[in-house]
């Protein structure tokens, strides 16, 4: 297993990395070979992955805005547009929002602003076994959730590993992480701990 | 609510009566050739100049077939013989995707940019790259649109748009521009629309089948479309055309906070350009992109100097060069920046690479037809006799002067509450505004009474020449 590393682990190991510990989080910035930027944040104490976001280049070479894969999306731009009034259109903040917040053993999604009772939702695994499909019987919400981690490993989804809950207008979907992904996590974590981390805050400035 | 509708109505009326500005060549809609490239005497706003138009048509056909990239065409002729009109006609007749970049020779003399940089940019602006790009689209059926003014009466309007697919529904907040677009496109409940997320452009696909019975009578052009399925937001591959210069600019922006300190106008590094050239040819080999050579039109090309001409020689040889169309009204004259004379003020070595199209002065009949077309374009009605007088003026002075008199005469006519411009009106403006030759004779007569006249008389001939 350790001999044959996954492509994902290899890619991250090869990337140019900068690490920083700030507010109890280990923040790591990766620059991949094709110019794509990746940002990850881990809790220093629990080693949970809190944020993973991407900045990809468009075909013509312009950099696109950050795409959040895991963690709360950055809402500053959205809020500014809501208060100041924007030129374009944006989703109203009463709409359901899907956020991925992983735990150590499971992938987890929280879909907020969904007031309907639990029996409204039909959550299945797509026929091609790559996506989780969330449907509502009242036709108000529909989403295909794909798990990039599983796709990178070329693993198929199994509806046995999935469970759902609903409380406080929030639908929570969990999917058990398979063993090989847990192994990768341990491997990467060991790698990241070896990184030289810069300290945030006032720099020590030794005279002479 | 009633108040808002009246406000909307007033705006609409204002839009309809908006005055359109008319350009010098806005009547030109093409080269006026038939399918065999034979020029029609009067067509698409073009009159006469049959051989020149035919030649331009042949070149256009070669451009369309992609055979002539990297070659030059020179349109030469006296002032006011339709050189720019032919170039405009070529641009109108080209396919919409192919870029047409027009510039004047004197445009490149800027203090902010070197001459060669300006020329290179103009070249790269006239080469298009057709490429596939992934964009995020929102596609759905409109459930509800509502636009409200704030209670205070002033400030930005607030809009909400509810879209649905067969599986879901989402509410969007609308910004100012989107509200304008929605009112302009007359989007209403039951329409199926797509919105490009990056640009915010809305396009209407049709009406939903479920709404087919809303009205008893529908427009023949109304299309009925199935309501989309699945998620509202979709990724779609869209083919669009960008110019090489646009790709240059995207890739030469300084990254990060350094962007704050560097202006956007500066020169683009040659390394960036080389990188992009190799990237584009890579795409082309992989079949991802297609190169569309366009046309670069340089008016008043004699204003370029010898450095530009030699640089043009080099640019024309590169493998990604557009078709360069130049126009000049000079005969044998000095090349700018040297003491050598050359035909059209262009060095012989560059002239050698060009195909030359000559334009000839217009005949009386053609002048009359052009004046007639301009009258139509400017919405001026003119008596037959007045047109004859104006044609006479046009033949004796210049076509441009006669065209300028049209607007002036129509104003005089309107002042006296006439409907048609008469001979009297023409006579009046002819006496009010003098043409170039009358101005010259006037100056010759009263030279002494003008300022600095004794200086010019005393000054030697060399100062006159500069």
Image (cartoon, coloured by chain):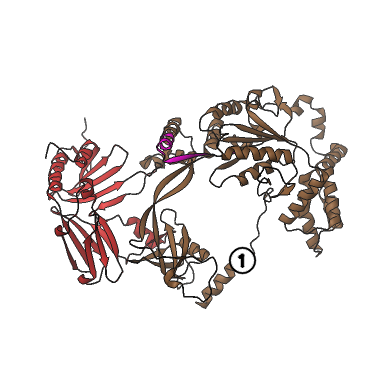
Q: In the drawing, does residue B148 fall left or right of residue B72? A: left
Which residue reaches farthest top? Answer: B340
B282 falls in the magenta region:
yes
Q: Is residue A203 in view from this perspective?
A: no
x and y percent of residue A88 in the render?
43, 59
Instruction: Identify by letter the chain in brown.
Output: B
Q: In the drawing, does residue B418 fall left or right of residue B216? A: right
Residue nearer the viewer, B14 or B446: B14
B222 falls in the magenta region:
no
For disc 1, the marked residue is B14
Residue nearer the viewer, A77 or B226: B226
Which residue reaches farthest right? Answer: B445
x and y percent of residue B96 in the render?
55, 47
Q: Chain of mark 1?
A: B
Q: In the drawing, does residue A137 fall left or right of residue B394? A: left
Instruction: Identify by letter the chain in red.
Output: A
Tell me the quarter of the picture where residue A39 sits: top left
| Screen quadrant of the C terminus of chain A | top left
Q: Which residue is pictured at 25% across the width and 41% down the height?
A: A30
Give the residues in magenta.
B280-296
Vertical comparison of B278 with B24: above or below: above
Q: Which residue is pictured at 67% across the width and 45% down the height?
A: B31
x and y percent of residue A87 in the render?
44, 59
């Amino acid at each position: 297993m350790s001999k044959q590393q996954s492509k994902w682990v290899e890619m991250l190991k090869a990337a140019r990395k900068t690490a920083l510990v700030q507010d109890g989080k280990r923040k790591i910035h990766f620059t991949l070979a094709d110019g794509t930027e990746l940002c990850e944040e881990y809790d220093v104490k629990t080693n949970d992955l809190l944020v993973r976001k991407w900045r990809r280049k468009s075909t013509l070479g312009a950099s696109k805005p950050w795409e959040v894969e895991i963690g709360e999306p950055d809402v500053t731009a959205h809020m500014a547009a809501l208060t100041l009034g924007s030129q374009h259109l944006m989703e109203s903040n009463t709409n359901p929002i899907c956020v991925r917040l992983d735990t150590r053993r499971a992938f987890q999604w929280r879909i907020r602003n969904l007031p309907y009772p639990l029996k409204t939702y039909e959550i299945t695994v797509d026929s091609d076994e790559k996506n989780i499909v969330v449907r509502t019987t009242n036709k108000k919400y529909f989403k295909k959730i794909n798990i990039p981690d599983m796709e990178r490993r070329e693993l198929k989804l199994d509806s046995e590993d999935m469970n759902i809950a609903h409380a406080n207008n929030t639908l929570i979907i969990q999917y058990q992480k398979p063993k090989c992904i847990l192994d990768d996590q341990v491997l990467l974590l060991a790698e990241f701990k070896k990184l030289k981390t810069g300290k945030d805050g006032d720099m020590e400035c030794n005279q002479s | 609510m009633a108040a808002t509708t009246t406000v909307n109505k007033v705006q609409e009326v204002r839009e309809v009566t908006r005055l359109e500005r008319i350009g010098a060549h806005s009547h030109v809609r093409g080269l006026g050739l038939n399918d065999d490239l034979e020029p029609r005497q009067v067509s698409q706003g073009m009159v006469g100049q049959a051989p020149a138009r035919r030649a331009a048509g042949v070149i256009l056909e070669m451009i369309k077939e992609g055979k002539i990239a990297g070659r030059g065409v020179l349109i030469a002729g006296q002032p006011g013989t339709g050189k720019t009109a032919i170039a405009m006609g070529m641009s109108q007749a080209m396919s919409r995707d192919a870029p047409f970049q027009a510039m004047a020779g004197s445009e490149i003399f800027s203090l902010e940019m070197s001459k060669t940089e300006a020329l290179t940019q103009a070249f790269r602006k006239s080469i298009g790259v057709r490429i596939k790009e992934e964009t995020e689209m929102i596609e759905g059926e409109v459930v509800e649109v509502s636009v409200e003014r704030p209670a205070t009466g002033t400030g930005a309007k607030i809009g909400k748009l509810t879209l649905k697919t067969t599986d879901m529904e989402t509410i969007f907040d609308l910004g100012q521009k989107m509200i304008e677009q929605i009112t302009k496109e007359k989007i209403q409940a039951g329409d199926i629309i797509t919105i490009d997320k990056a640009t915010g452009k809305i396009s209407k696909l049709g009406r939903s089948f479920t709404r087919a019975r809303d009205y008893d009578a529908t427009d023949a052009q109304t299309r009925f479309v199935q309501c989309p399925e699945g998620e509202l937001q979709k990724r779609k591959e869209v083919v669009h055309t960008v110019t090489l210069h646009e790709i240059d600019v995207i890739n030469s922006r300084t990254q990060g906070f350094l962007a704050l300190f560097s202006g956007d106008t500066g020169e683009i590094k040659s390394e960036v350009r080389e990188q992009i050239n190799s990237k584009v040819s890579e795409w082309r080999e992989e079949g991802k992109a297609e190169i569309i050579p366009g046309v670069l039109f340089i008016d008043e090309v004699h204003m370029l100097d010898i450095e530009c001409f030699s640089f043009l020689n080099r640019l024309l040889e590169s493998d990604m060069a557009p078709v360069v169309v130049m126009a000049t009204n000079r005969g044998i004259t000095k090349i700018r920046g040297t003491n050598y004379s050359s035909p059209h003020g262009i060095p012989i070595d560059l002239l050698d690479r060009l195909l030359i199209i000559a334009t000839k002065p217009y005949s009386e009949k053609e002048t009359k037809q052009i004046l007639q077309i301009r009258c139509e374009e400017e919405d001026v009605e003119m008596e037959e006799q007045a047109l004859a007088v104006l044609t006479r003026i046009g033949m004796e002075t210049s076509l441009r002067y006669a065209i300028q008199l049209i607007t002036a005469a129509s104003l005089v006519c309107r002042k006296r509450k006439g409907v048609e411009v008469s001979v009297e009106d023409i006579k009046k403006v002819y006496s009010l505004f003098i043409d170039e030759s009358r101005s010259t004779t006037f100056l010759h007569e009263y030279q002494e009474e003008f300022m600095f006249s004794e200086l010019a008389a005393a000054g030697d001939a060399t100062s006159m020449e500069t």
